[in-house]
Amino acid sequence: MNLSLYIAKRYAISFSKNKAINIITGIASVGIIASTMALFIFLSVFSGLKEFTLNFANVTDPDFRLETTNGKFFNISEKQEQQLKASKNIASYSKIVEERVYFLYSEKEVVAHIKGVDNNYNKVNDFNSHLYAGDWFESNSEEVVVGAEISRKLALGLFDYSNALEVFAPKPGKGNIENPNEAFNKAMLFPSGIYSINEDLDSKYVFCDIVLAQNLLGLQSNQYTNIEIKASPESDEDEFRIEIEKIFGSTIKIKNRAQLNDSLYKMLQSENLFIYLFSTLVVILTLFCLAGAIVMIIIDKKENLKTLYNIGVTKNSIRNIFFAQGIIITLFGLFIGLVLAIAIIVLQQQFSFIMITSSMPYPVSFEWSNIVIVVTTIIILGIISSWIASGTVTKNLLK
């Protein structure tokens, strides 16, 4: 193998007398460089777009959310609340009451979710940073914070105490409704702030004090729809899940960020797989050029190979020459392509050469996992291509 590797190195770095062979080999090398760059850049661009998308999707999502396994609401005892406060895995938590209700303002109407939150909510989710007008509501008040789309649809203003935002929620209970006016709980609300994140979220929530939401929905003071939790930096998810199950038993299900956006994560994973397979197809086509180049070199070196065979070099050793040469060309193209691609991604991150808008750079993300994927893919396909090409060395060729 040492002899085969030595000769392979000589063939890889020296030029053939046949210019066509040199051109074909050069095209194969450039192709590997280009396909390596394409694969890494595509993966990095998609990683950036994925991170960009999830930043919008996860902006209101906590690290964990506790939901009931039965019905809409669940009770929390004082003992359970003390256990939550004492947990080392929890940095902060907020009790939530959420329900879909009907809003009416100046003969304009909209259906959205009212979300009652306690004083800890902004410790779990820094929602204050998304307010573009007004302030967060005061505790124990009728003030609310509405989404920009809801504000637009209802033509809402802030601190308009002469014209309240009316909210209606069905009263809990059973039986026939004889008087429609008695079928709903009603409250008068006064917007104190408007938030803006994205179109979906801006048209979904109206935030209010949790006591107001409980009264509107006819709930007890210890009834909630979910608990949103911010995990402590040193927390372990498995340990956290075990602890929560001990506190609440089987009545509670625990969802992390990925599970809260399960369909979005699955869609992004599918798109990532498609991008990888498409890019890999380009690499495969490029490495066919490498195989063709090696076959042409074998034909060009036919007389030299006969000499080697006649002085005792085995057929397998001669095959190893061209197998090793294919690997050398593959590794050379991989290294150059990866260096160039990393440089492009890093420069885009630092200097934002490509912009989506005048203020928003095209998102890319440098990830070590993408390097591992690229290196593994190129080397495996390079080995297969080199092995196929070296297999054209037969006894008939050497006689």
Image: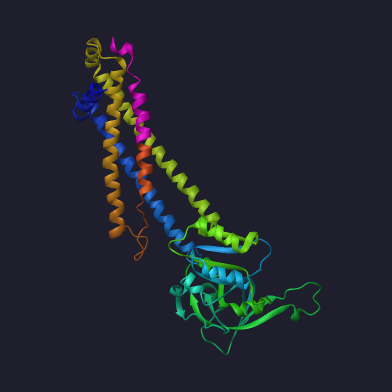
Which quadrant of the figure has residue 37?
Answer: top left
Q: Horizontally, is 94 left or right of 290 in the view?
A: right
Tell me which segment is drawn in magenta: 379-399
> In the image, residue 142 lies at what x, y percent?
58, 84
Total marks shown come to 0
Q: Horizontally, is 24 left or right of 52 in the view?
A: left
- Can you say which quadrant of the picture contains the N terminus? top left
Please state which of residues 103 and 171 is positioned toward the viewer in this rendering: 171
- Above or below, comparing residue 150 to residue 46 in the picture: below
Chief secondary structure of the magenta portion? helix
Report the coloring of the rendering: rainbow
Q: Is residue 390 magenta?
A: yes
Q: Is residue 201 magenta?
A: no
Please state which of residues 150 and 241 is positioned toward the viewer in this rendering: 241
Please state which of residues 51 and 251 is positioned toward the viewer in this rendering: 251
> In the image, residue 56 lies at what x, y percent?
46, 63
Q: Residue at x 24, y 20 (%)?
A: 300
- Could one spot residue 204 in this view of the protein? no
Q: Horizontally, is 187 left or right of 360 in the view?
A: right
Q: Residue at x 34, y 32 (%)?
A: 382
Q: Residue at x 19, y 26 (%)?
A: 10
- Could one spot residue 245 in this view of the protein? yes
Please state which of residues 296 and 209 is positioned toward the viewer in this rendering: 209
- Above or below, comparing residue 342 to residue 223 in the picture: above
Which quadrant of the figure has residue 68?
Answer: bottom right
- Above or below, comparing residue 293 to residue 93 in the picture: above
> In the image, residue 371 lies at what x, y percent?
35, 45
- Can you say which quadrant of the picture contains the C terminus? top left
> In the image, residue 127 lies at what x, y percent?
47, 72
Q: Residue at x 28, y 59 (%)?
A: 350
